[in-house]
Image (spheres, rainbow, N blue to C red):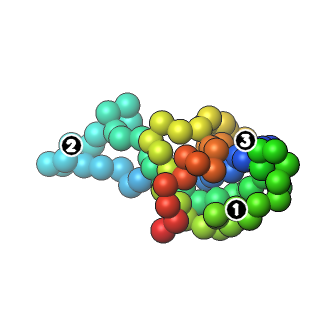
Amino acid sequence: MIKPLGDRIVLSIDQPEEEKVGGILIANNAKEKPVMGSVVAISETSVGDSKAPKSVKVGDKVMFDKYAGSQVTIDGEDYLIVHEKDILGVL
């Protein structure tokens, strides 16, 4: 597993169910980007090396900014690495 640095958080992206509109399957490139995921890993330090508590913990389901972070694939799994400020809320 990847260990995030700074104020970054690793999220597992929740993929939405395949959408059908009137019985027609919508192409992947026409779908909205996912905005929900689960926290997989949290950095141990923040900017300035302060040990301020994080607003999320591993296992939390969160909503994040649509265009936030960097998407990476590790061992066939898609992850998103975001800054803590890009997380909009905990579900």
Badge 1 marks a residue whose secondary structure is loop
Crowdedness of circle 2 by 10 Å Cα count: few (<14), some, many (20+)? Answer: few
Q: Which residue is mark 3?
A: 74
Badge 3 marks a residue whose secondary structure is strand
Q: Determine the CA span between mark 3 and mark 2.
A: 32 Å
Is 84 situated left or right of 62 in this image?
A: right
| Of marks 3 and 2, the one in the foreground | 3
Is 5 situated left or right of 35 in this image?
A: right
Closer-to-camera residue (15/25): 15
| Of marks 3 and 1, the one in the foreground | 1
Of callouts 2 and 1, the N-terminal one: 2
Q: Quadrant of residue 24?
A: top left
Residue 8, image x, y percentages: 70, 46
Badge 2 marks a residue whose secondary structure is strand
Q: CB atoms at circles 2 and 1 under 8 Å apart?
A: no
Is 26 situated left or right of 34 in this image?
A: left
Q: Determine the CA span between mark 3 and mark 1.
A: 24 Å
Q: Amino acid at mark 2?
A: Ile
Q: Determine the CA span between mark 2 and mark 1.
A: 43 Å
Residue 74, image x, y percentages: 72, 41
Disc number placed over residue 54 in the picture, else none: 1
What residue lies at 62% left-to-right and 44% top-to-bottom? 82
Residue 6, image x, y percentages: 78, 44
| Of marks 2 and 1, the one in the foreground | 1
Q: How many marks?
A: 3
Of callouts 3 and 1, the N-terminal one: 1
Residue 86, image x, y percentages: 55, 46
Q: Which residue is mark 2?
A: 24
What residue lies at 50% left-to-right and 50% top-to-bottom? 64
Seen in the picture, residue 27 relative to 88 is either above or below; the reply is above
Toward the top, the furthest residue is 29
Of callouts 3 and 2, the N-terminal one: 2
